[in-house]
Image (spheres, rainbow, N blue to C red):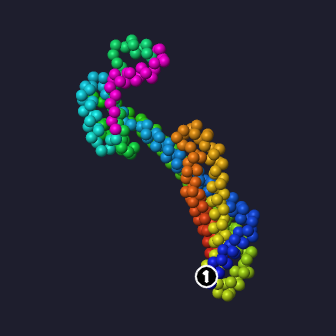
Amino acid sequence: MKTITFKRIMRAGWLGFWRNAWLSAATIIVMTLVLFVVGNLVFLGALSHTVLRSLESKIDVSVYFTPDAPEQEILTLKREMEARPDVKEVSYISRDSALASFRERHKDSALIVGALDELDDNPLQASVNIKAADSSQYGAISDFLAEKKSPIVSKINYFENQDVIDRLSSIVGSVRGAGAVLTIFLAFVAVLVAFNTIRMAIYTVREEIKIMRLVGASRWFIRGPFLVTGLLYGAAAGALITLAFLPLTWLAAPKLLLLVPDFNLFRYFISNGLEFFLIMLGAGIFLGVVSSLIAVRRYLEA
């Protein structure tokens, strides 16, 4: 008996999906637009993670020393930093090494090389570059160095670099927030459209529903076909937007690579295709079922 009831609900839901084909198509299109925004938020999250990770890998705490700083004291500070658990790596660049690297970088500039040759002394400072075990620990390392107030330390440059990271994080957060607001708005529109579509479907079979209620059919027996119809709306929208993103990511990937060489959008989509499809499918089904549930509940309680 339960099997027959389940088959009847599924069949009625399928027929309801096709009975109002144009309304169904409009509902699926609106849901697809919602899922398009959701999908782009997923891509934005992956992109921002890649960009921030790339920037953080290039950031370190650079400590510059006074020209007369004894090398032994610099090495003592280096060993002290290496002993900290939040420090991953410490590299020391002497004044001579810094000058040699500078000359190598500017060997094609006769003006700069000539200016260096005219100087009586090495103008560059010795430095120590510190890599943290985790990017969140740079602040603590910088604060520790600043609080030491060592007389041989001339400058600590982490704080300038951190401003760039903080600004980028703020921009990414703002974009995500705007995307979330847009998603909520479009989701509301999608629920409203699906709600009205289901309500019209209910209206077309209102006489059947009256008869079922008279013979004692349960509310779930009446709701079932409409929930299946809503589920089909969401599933169709989830499948449609996943297929649409295949050519869209392929077209957008080369342009995005020019801006962010470390992130290949198409490759990311292909490698996470199943997970992405399940997210879109789940979001679509949720929208469809919730819309149907609200519409049927309001009708039955009227």
Tell me if residue 216 comes above or below residue 113 in the rendering.
below
Q: How many marks?
A: 1
Picture residue at 33% right of the left edge, 16% below the top: 121
Quarter of the image holding residue 206? bottom right
Which residue does the numbered mark 1 point to in the structure image?
2
Q: Which of 73 and 301 is in front in this view?
A: 73
Residue 42 percent location from the top left of the image? 55, 52
Q: Residue 105 lies in magenta, yes or no?
A: yes
Q: Is residue 77 left or right of residue 301?
A: left
Q: For the residue labelled by badge 1, is the local secondary structure a helix, a strand or a loop?
A: helix
Query: In the current view of this chain or complex, which residue is farthest to the top?
Result: 118
Picture residue at 34% right of the left edge, 38% below the top: 89
Could you tell me which quadrant the C terminus lies in?
bottom right
Residue 44 percent location from the top left of the image? 55, 48
Q: Is residue 246 left or right of residue 113?
A: right
Picture residue at 36% right of the left edge, 38% below the top: 131
Q: Residue 90 lies in magenta, yes or no?
A: yes
Picture residue at 64% right of the left edge, 71% below the top: 228
Q: What residue type is labelled 1?
A: Lys
Can I make out residue 178 in this image? no
Query: In the current view of this chain or complex, which residue is farthest to the bottom?
Result: 215
Could you tell me which quadrant the N terminus lies in?
bottom right
Magenta segment: 89-111
Quarter of the image holding residue 124? top left
Q: Nearer the viewer, residue 166 or 35?
A: 35
Q: In this view, does 94 lie to the left or right of 239?
A: left
Tell me if residue 169 comes above or below residue 120 in the rendering.
below
Can I make out residue 164 in this image? yes
Quarter of the image holding residue 160? top left
